[in-house]
Image: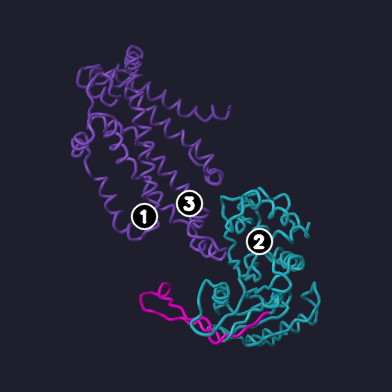
Chain colours: A cyan, B purple
Amino acid sequence: MPTQLQSRVQRPSQEAKRADALIIADVTRTYDARAQKGPRAAKVQALAGLCLHASAGELLAVVGPSGCGKSTLLELICGLQQPDAGSISCPPAVLMPQRDLLLPWLSALDNAALALRIAGRSREESRGLAGELFAELGLAGFEQARPHELSGGMRQRVAFLRTLLSGKPVLCLDEPFGALDAITRSEMQQWLIRTLAREPRTVVLVTHDVEEAILLGDRVAVLSPRPGRVVAELEVELGRPRARTDPDVIHLRERALSALGLGGGG
Amino acid sequence: MKRDLVRVVPVLALVALLLGAWELYVDIAGVQGDLLPAPHAVAGALWDSGALVWRNFAITAEEVVLGLALALAAGFLLAVAIHLSPLLRRAAYPLAVGSQAVPIPVIGVLLVFWWGFGIFPKLVVIALICFFPVLVSTVDGLASVDPDQPKLLRTLDASRWQAFRFAELPAALPAALSGVRIALAVGVIGAFIAETTTPTSGAYSGLGREIVVDAGGFQTPRAYAATVVLFAFAISCFYSLALAERRLAPWNVRRQGGTR
C-alpha cells in the first residue's frame, strides 16, 4: 500500500525537494594518520578543493581509486566529520556504511526498523512500517531471520531498508555492493534502481567500480587519487535498465577510465 | 527430554567411576574413616543427618543467592560506570583488581564489627569475591562492540543512551553472562569463606560452618556429606544459568553453543 505508506513514513515533499540540492564547494579535509603509520605524525590530505553538486532526486555516482577519500566525502556529507576548508550545503543525509553492521541480536525486520525505534516510535509501530516495505522490496518471509542467517545480498537489502527508513532526503551509499559476488551484485544493482523508482531520494553512491557507476548513476563524478578532487563529470543520459554491453555504456566507461589515467584498453 | 537424559550419561558414568575408585582405595589401602570416609559412609552420614544438613543448606543457599545478587548488581553497575567514564576506569579499575588480593579473614572481623553476626557481613564477603569476574567480563563485553557501530548509530541520530541500549548493552551480554557463570561457580566457596570468617554461633549457621565444626570434631563423614551438597549446589547454580542464557542471549547460544 504505497499511498498509505507515503503519509506515514517521513518523506520529502515536492516543495522541500527544491531546497534539497547537495552543494559541496571547495572542500578540503586533512586527517592525522598517526594511528596507522607509527609514532611519527603523518598528515594525510584526503580531499583537496573538491566541488560537487547533486540536484534533488538525482543519483550521483562517485568513482575513484582506492583511498581517494570517497568514504571521507560521505562522512562529510552526513555531518560525521567537518571540513577543514570549504562549505557543504546539504539537507539531512544518512550514511549506509561499507559493512552492513546489522545488529546480530535483532531480527531482519527489527534491524530495518532501527531508525524508527531511535526516532521514538514503539516496537509494534516500527515493525508495521518496516514490514510493509519488506514485502514490497522482495524481503517477505525473512522478517524473523537473524542477520547471520541471511545471504550477503539479503543483508545489504536490509541495511539499505534501514537507511531508507531513517526518513532523510539524502542517502550516502558507501560501496554498497563491493563485498558481493558478481551475480548478486548485478541483481542488487537492478534492485536498487527499482527501489529508488518506488522511493525516490537524492543518492550519493560511492564505488570503485567504473562500470557500476555508469550503470547506476544519473551523473558520474570521477575522483583523482589522494588527495581527491573531481577530474571529470559525466552525464549519463541513458534509459534504464542499462546493459553493460550497450555501446554508450562502453563509451562512457572508457571516458571515465581515461579520466583516471587508465584508458586506451579497448 | 530424551536428549537431555543422553547428555547427563557421561557425567553420571564418570561419577560412578570415581566413586568406585574411591571406595576401592579406602578398602584396599585401609584408610581410617576419620581421615577419608568411604563413599558409602558419606552416604550414610547424609542419610542420618539429613535434617541438619538440609537446614544448614537452606541457610547457605540463601547467602549464596543474595550474595550473588549483590555481586551481580555491583559488578554490572561498576562495569557500566567504568565503560562510560575513562576517568573512573583509570581511578577505580586498579583498586577493583587489588580488592581480589585482600585476604578475607583480615577484613572479616571489621565486617562483623560494623554489621554484627547476621547475614549481611556474609553477603558482603560473597559479593567481594564474586563481583570481580562480572566486572571484568562486562567491561570487556561493553568494549567489544564493533568500532564502526557508533558511526552507524550516529548517522541514524541515536542518543548516547540509545547507542548503549541498542548496541553496547546487547553486545556485552554474552561476555557478561560468562562472568556471571564464573561468579556462580565461585559463589559457593565464597559462602564457605564468608561463614568461616564472619561466624555465627549455634548449630544452624550454614554448611561451611558445619563442615569446619564436623571436621574438627571427628565427624568426618558428615563433613564430607555437607561437602557433597555444596559440590552439587555449585554445579546446579552454574547450569541453571544455561537456561537463563537461552532466553537472554538466544543469538549467542545458537552461534556458539552456550553452556552445555
Q: Is residue B23 visible?
A: no
Mark 1 burial class by Cα count in 10 Å: few <14, some 14-19, many 20+ = many
Q: From what the image shows, is residue A28 above or below residue A81?
A: below
Residue marked by disc 3: B169
Residue B205 position by quadrant = top left
CA–CA distance in space, label 1 to label 3: 14 Å
Tell me the tag on residue A183.
none
Residue in view at x 53 percent, y 61 percent: B158
Q: Left or right of A225: which side holds B137? A: left
| Residue type at numbered disc 1 | Ile
Task: Judge depth for marks 2 and 3 and give the one in front.
Answer: 2
Mark 3 is surrounded, within 10 Å at the Cα level, by few (under 14), some (14 to 19) or many (20 or more) other residues, namely some
Q: To which quarter of the image does residue A167 belong?
A: bottom right
| Identity, as a three-letter code, of the amino acid under mark 2 | Leu
Mark 1 element type: helix
Verify whether residue A217 appears in magenta.
no
The residue tagged 2 is A165
